[in-house]
Amino acid sequence: MGAGIVARNSEGVCLAWRTRHFLYNSAADLAEALAAREAASLAIQRGWKSIILEGDCKNIIARLNSNDMDLSILGPIVDDIRKLMRSIPCCKAEFVPRECNSLAHNLARKAKANLDGRILPNIDSL
């Protein structure tokens, strides 16, 4: 399973990106949750004060925006993400259709091919 994370500024310019390859195959919800946790961690590492976590999995976005305790198997990951989000002064999670999230989706596909890192020969070819 792979995750692709893209950080853009308010003009849409790519500031950073990451891929992660996970050695297990599971539901898309888990991949989206792990990508959101990675994105929030990246924002904290970079010292960004205002971010929008975008994802194309309505289920995960709804869980992140809920104040209810998540008792599902994803609950501990969702709780981690919420804690990270609370440590960023202005942070929210929003759903975006996959077609609007194509770079992150393509990075995730590359990550599944065991590409793990931040450097690709030409990011425009994704």
Image (tube, rainbow, N blue to C red):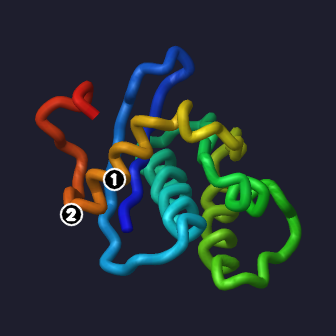
* Nearer to the camera, 49 or 67: 67
Instruction: Give the residue at mark 2.
Output: 114
Which residue is most to the front? 99
Residue drawn where x is 34% and y is 72% of the image: 22
Where 53 sits versus 66, above or below? Answer: above
Give coordinates of residue 52: x percent, y percent. 63, 38
Direction from residue 80 to residue 37 in the image, left or right: left
Residue carrying label 1: 109
**What residue is shown at x 69% (from left), y 43% (from top)?**
95
Q: Residue at x 23, y 58 (%)?
A: 116
Mark 1 residue crowding within 10 angstroms, few (<14) / some (14–19) / many (20+)? some
Tell me the quadrant of the picture where the C terminus can be found: top left
* 1, 17: nearer the viewer: 1
* Secondary-structure class at tag 2: loop
Amino acid bearing label 2:
Asn
- Residue 40, compared with residue 1, is above or below; it is above
Closer to the N terminus: mark 1 or mark 2? 1
Residue 112 at x, y percent in the picture: 29, 62
Going by the numbered disc 1, the residue's amino acid type is: Arg
Quarter of the figure that contains the N terminus: bottom left
Q: Is residue 124 left or right of residue 97?
A: left
Q: Give how far apart the Cα atoms at labels 1 and 2 are.
A: 9 Å
